[in-house]
Amino acid sequence: MSEPTQNEQRLKVIVADDQAAVREPLAAVLGLSEDIEVVAAAADGSQVLTAVAAGPVDVVLMDLRMPVMDGIEATRRLTEEHPEVAVVVLTTFADDDSILAALSAGARGYLTKNAGREDIARAIRAAAAGQSVLDREVQDRLLATARTKAPTPEQPLPGDITPREREVLTLIGQGLPNRAIAEKLFISEATVKTHINNLFAKADIRDRADAVRRAIAAGLA
C-alpha cells in the first residue's frame, strides 16, 4: 500500500461566511498552515452542504448569520447527514441563544471573530480529533448562564470516576481550557485530553458545555 501524500494528510476545511471580505482572506491565511488545506469557500449553508457532498471534508468553519441557509441549520444538517464532518463556529455573535443553538445543532467548537489565526487553526485540529473547543468568552458566558439558571436536581457522577478525572471536571467547570488545566495539574495537554475522553465516556457527557453543566450539578463548580 502506498504512503499517503502530504496533501492527503492535510485537514480538508471549508470556510463558510457570507462576506467575501472575511471569507477570502481567512481561507488564504488558513491555507498557509502546513496541515490545513482549504478545499472550498461558501457564502451560505446550502453551498456548504453541496461542497461537503462533493467531499472529502474534515472540518467546516461556519459563520452563523448567512442568507439562504444559516449556520445553525447547516450545522444541524451536517450533523445528521455527515456526522464525520466537524463544525467549528466562527462568528461575531456570542449571545447565549446563538451559542446554545450552535452547540445543540452539533457544533464541536465555537469561536468569536476576535480569535487569531493560530487559535482558529488549533480549534480546527481539535475538532477534527473529536475534541470540543470554546473560546474563553464563550466558556465564561456558558458558565454564567448555567449558574444563574434555576438549580437542577443534582446529578451524581459514576462511581468509577477517578480522583484525577474529578479534578479535571472541576477545572472544566471553572471555565479553564485544556492548556490551563495541564499547567494547573502539572501534566501534559495530551494527558488532559485522555482524562477528558475517559470522563466523557464514563459520565455520558456530550461536549464541553455539557461538562460545565455536569460540574455545576455535581457541586464541583
Image (cartoon, rainbow, N blue to C red):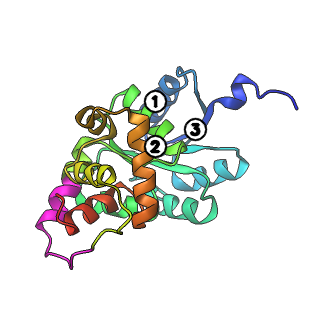
- Magenta-colored stretch includes residue 151: yes
Read off the residue under disc 3. 13
Q: Earlier in the sequence, mark 1 or mark 2?
A: 2
Q: Residue at the location (18% across, 59% down)?
A: 220
Looking at the figure, which quarter contains the N terminus? top right
Q: Residue at the location (70% across, 44% down)?
A: 56
Q: Amino acid at mark 1?
A: Leu
Q: Mark 2: give few (<14), some (14-19) or many (20+) Cα within 10 Å.
A: many
Looking at the figure, which quarter contains the C terminus? bottom left
Which label number is shown at residue 8? none
Q: Position of residue 25 (x, y in %)?
A: 46, 26
Q: Amino acid at mark 3?
A: Val
Q: Mark 3: give few (<14), some (14-19) or many (20+) Cα within 10 Å.
A: many
Read off the residue under disc 1. 26
Q: Quadrant of residue 207?
A: bottom left
Depth order, front residue of 167/74: 167
Task: Find the magenta span and give its range.
Answer: 141-155
Residue 40 shown left or right of residue 122 in the figure: right
Label 1 SS:
helix
Q: Mark 1: give few (<14), some (14-19) or many (20+) Cα within 10 Å.
A: some
Q: Position of residue 137 (x, y in %)?
A: 22, 44
Marks 1 & 2, CB-CB < 8 Å contact: yes
Read off the residue under disc 2. 17
Q: Quadrant of residue 158?
A: bottom left
Q: Residue at the location (31% across, 57% down)?
A: 99
- Magenta-colored stretch includes residue 171: no
Depth order, front residue of 130/22: 130
